[in-house]
Amino acid sequence: MRILSPAISQLARLRMGRIEYFMQYPLQVQQQVFQSLISAAQYTEFGKQYNFSSIYKIEEFKQRVPVHNYDSIKPYIQRVMEGQQNVLWNTPIKWFAKSSGTTADKSKFIPVSVESLDECHYRSGRDVLSLYYNNFPDSDLLTGKSLVIGGSHQVNKLSTDSDSYYGDLSAVMLQNMPFYGNMIRTPDLSIALMDEWEEKIERMANAVIHENVTSIAGVPTWTLVLIKRIFELTGTDNLADVWPNLELYMHGGVSFTPYREQFKKLIRKPDMYYQETYNASEGFFAAQDIIGQEGLLLFLNHGIFYEFMPMEEYGKEYPRTLQLQDVELGKNYAIIISTNGGLWRYLVGDTIQFVSLAPYRIRVSGRTKSFINAFGEELIVENSDKAIAHACDVTGAIVNDYTAAPIYFSDAGNGGHEWLVEFDVMPGNVEQFVEVLDKTLQSINSDYEAKRHKDIALRMPVMHVLPNGTFCEWLKSKGKLGGQHKVPRLNNERNYVEEILRFSQTANL
């Protein structure tokens, strides 16, 4: 690998010129992406329906094409899944990324074109490497292998007589990856594409402990499960003992804030770095360009045209959206994308905030449906993650996962929030943990603070400590163990909290 590494790392560094171009000329680059998408799709059925051939300005596009969620664009996708082509995009769609569903469907199937693979997902992967090498020019990252912890849906045919396939985005990417990509990753495809998660963890752990792993990529929750199994097999409690050349963990999918200290304890190595990415089935949107500094660089020349919806517009039939030149720092926006995979003005479901406007850097603040606002408290995941992390610091606890929902007003008393928390290390004092959690939320969210004043609208949070493994077993019972599946951190409705609490009381954990 040392022969191959210098060549690949040099290519990674050369890519920085293109990255710096869209950093310097973001508006022009997005205009070019917009025109390219409209031109490519003008003769598709969707393009003809909205007369793309006569659209020359972004405002015309926004006036003609409504904002779509998955449920509204699903009829088009269903036709493509049935074998029709040139519906949403002008090149054949043979692959679909399966992800967690909406309120109407258990799963979503996102069309994946050749262009979206090559110009978005794979290009973004190369750009993540380029950004890392730009931070650490003398890195030996590519002298070893990258441990990729993929999803739980292996590649399957849509039907017996179909020539189209579906799977987790990671499975689709691995199946189509260029040969050189497979040379620098582990484990073998036969393990990486397994869909039985428990067996997959076992086989993966046994397969990779003897590799020279220099980087890991995966969702924190499932990465921790794998690390703990590796510790059981090797008898160590420091991953640096297993892989002394390990230097990078690339994470995404959920906030890393509650997990950071836990990873530092499991990987005790001074030259260990953490790089956040923002990758979804719909596209690869951003990645951390300055290691150790808040903010993910928004990828602007990767086949995605962006719009940003102020959250006060969410739910309106004709919402107002903004382009890059109109956004403000620190304000919550829902992301809307048009892509070279055939998604048009598609509401991703994530909320972001800009932390820099030159260049454009973002942070993921939550989900459009992952918040608690039952009493006007406007509690978002970013708030809850910070509060959980601080409560852990103060009490010496380590949290595996959590979820929370409102307790509504009743004859028995006023409202509040009910928290289900699973600890890896219990706090010295659970009541202190709840108190610090509550005080931290008040300090970082003025709306929450106002509602908590003298317990007028919100009483002290109620917290249930769940047996270790509850969330994992609950996901397993739902057929959602592994991959990108996760328990919603916050929910404005009580269904998740009530169901998981019942499960914890009846399951043999």
Image: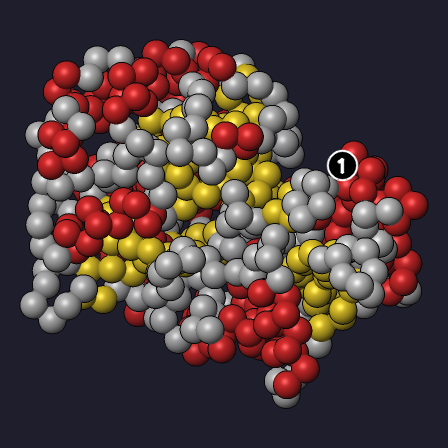
Q: Residue furthest front?
A: 411
Tell me if 237 is positioned left or right of 98 in this view.
right
Q: How many marks?
A: 1
Extreme bottom residue here?
Answer: 508
Residue 298 on image: x %, y %: 46, 28
Looking at the rendering, which quadrant does residue 447 occupy? top right
Q: Is residue 224 visible?
A: no
Q: Residue at x 10, y 63 (%)?
A: 162
Residue 122, image x, y percentages = 31, 40
Q: Residue at x 48, y 52 (%)?
A: 217
Q: Residues within 10 Å of mark 1 (few under 14, many from 20)?
A: some
Question: Which residue occupies the foreground of this view, 217 or 442?
Answer: 442
Which quadrant of the view contains residue 129? top left
Residue annotated with mark 1 = 447
- Frontmost residue, 406 versus 508: 406
Amino acid found under the numbered disc labelled 1 = Asp
The foreground one among 433 and 54 is 54
Quadrant position of the C terminus in the picture: bottom right
